[in-house]
Image (cartoon, rainbow, N blue to C red):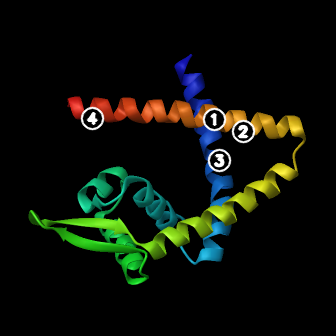
Amino acid sequence: MIERRLNHLSALMDQMALVMPRLMRSSCDETDLTPHQGILLRALEERGPTSLTELRQSFPGAQSTLSEIVGRLARLGFVQKKPLPTDRRTVMVAITARGRAMVEQQRKVMRERHRNVLEKLSSEDQDRIVQAMETVAELFGRAAAAVQNAEKEE
């Protein structure tokens, strides 16, 4: 039974992976950021100042890629990098006022993209997609928390 669910989930995730970048790309095109840069800015806005080490744990992938993203955002004035006063080896990354303004601009663009999507659907389908996204967000949140707890126990 789990294999069937796993195959179906994988197929659905592949479909979403093909559709979501089109929505994300449009907001980034208007703000001149890549989707990864936009996601990182929103994460920093939500979390507050975060060490590069913590960011690497939250954004898996090549360390050099994350360093490049943070470096570009710093050059653009969207984030600020500072060594931690108590441990100068630890670099903290914080969003700047300019970065917050960029996040707000991205949100406005994405809201319009979402409006365009919803307007093409019936009222019932609008409700269905919002309810589905609520369910997906809740379940993936629970799954992510379970994975984090399991990793802490190891």
Query: Residue 50 bears which disc, if any?
Result: none
Q: Which residue is mark 3?
A: 16
Real-space Cα separation, disc 4 to disc 3, in angstroms: 27 Å
Where does the C terminus fall, quadrant-wise?
top left
| Residue pictured at 27% horizontal, 54% vertical | 54
In the image, is 24 to the left or to the right of 141? right
Which amino acid is tagged 3?
Met
Which amino acid is tagged 2?
Val
Q: Position of residue 129 (x, y in %)?
A: 75, 39
- Residue furthest to the top: 1
Q: Callout 2: few (<14), some (14-19), or many (20+) C-alpha neighbours within 10 Å?
A: few
Q: Position of residue 11 (x, y in %)?
A: 63, 39
Query: Mark 4, mark 3: which one is toward the viewer?
Result: 4
Whether tag 2 and tag 1 are in contact, CB under 8 A, the answer is: yes
Real-space Cα separation, disc 2 to disc 1, in angstroms: 6 Å
N-terminal label among 1 and 3? 3
Which amino acid is tagged 4?
Glu
